[in-house]
């Protein structure tokens, strides 16, 4: 069984993330969406909330599992029995950072490969940071995030 891990903060999950999840789920036997716990990050949603939002948004994809982790991604990937890390790329600027991460993980876990997937063109500009900013000002995020995430953002910001 070919197991892949798609890590991220997903704060919040966007339709760009969902696009990568759906496409990766057709390539790998089992896809683990790994929500990272980062103490230094100032997240809008707690790790538990992000896991719940992702589980709801991906509930119809049979071979997808949502989990959370803390620590080195390379360690987490090995504990899950995975050999592949999936990373989404929007633009050239993403590539520089992702290449550094992939090479670091390769050093720490030589048997783990990183697979880069290009984001669908209609989501290339989309980021969780932009979503939070627009939602925080009460702007329209319909079609940019799953419906459950849109509701959670409106509730979090007390709008709509």
Image (spheres, rainbow, N blue to C red):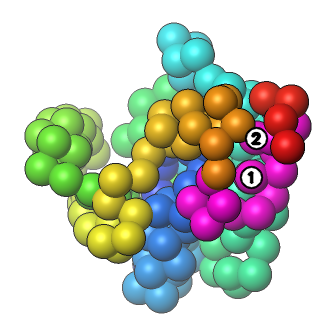
Residue under the image location 19 percent in, 53 percent down = 91
Quarter of the rendering containing residue 103: top left
Q: Position of residue 124 (x, y in %)?
A: 32, 60
Q: Is residue 72 visible?
A: yes
Residue at 78% of width from left, 73% of height from top? 59
Decide which of 28, 97 is in the foreground and name it: 97
- Asked whether 150 falls inside the magenta stretch, the response is yes
- Image check: 153 left or right of 158? left
Q: Which residue is mark 1?
A: 149
* Residue 19 highlighted magenta (yes or no): no
Quadrant hosting residue 89: bottom left
Highlighted magenta segment, given as a residue range: 141-156
Q: Examine the rendering and report whether any part of residue 1 can be seen.
A: no
Picture disc at residue 153: 2
**CB atoms of marks 1 and 2 within 8 Å:** yes
Q: Is residue 24 above or below residue 138?
A: below
The location of residue 4, given as percent across then percent down, is: 45, 67
In front: 70, or 40? 40
76 vs 56, nearest the viewer? 56
- Across and down, in percent, residue 143 comes to 61, 66
Q: Kindly identify the residue that appears in the image at 68 percent across and 81 percent down.
A: 61
The main secondary structure of the magenta stretch is helix
Could you say where residue 100 lies in the image, as x and y percent from the top left? Answer: 15, 37
| Residue 90 marker | none
Residue farthest top in this picture: 40
């Amino acid at each position: 069984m070919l197991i892949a891990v798609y890590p991220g903060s997903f704060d919040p999950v966007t339709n760009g993330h969902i696009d990568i999840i759906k496409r990766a789920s057709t390539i790998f036997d089992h896809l683990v969406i790994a929500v990272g716990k980062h103490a230094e990050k100032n997240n809008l949603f707690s790790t538990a909330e992000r896991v719940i939002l992702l589980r709801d948004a991906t509930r119809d994809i049979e071979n997808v599992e949502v989990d959370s982790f803390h620590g080195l991604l390379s360690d987490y990937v090995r504990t899950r029995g995975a050999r592949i890390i999936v990373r989404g790329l929007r633009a050239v600027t993403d590539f520089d950072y992702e290449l550094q991460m992939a090479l670091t993980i390769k050093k720490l876990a030589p048997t783990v490969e990183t697979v880069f997937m290009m984001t669908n063109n209609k989501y290339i500009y989309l980021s969780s940071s932009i979503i939070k900013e627009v939602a925080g000002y009460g702007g329209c995020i319909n079609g940019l995030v799953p419906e459950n995430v849109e509701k959670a953002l409106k509730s979090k910001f007390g709008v709509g």
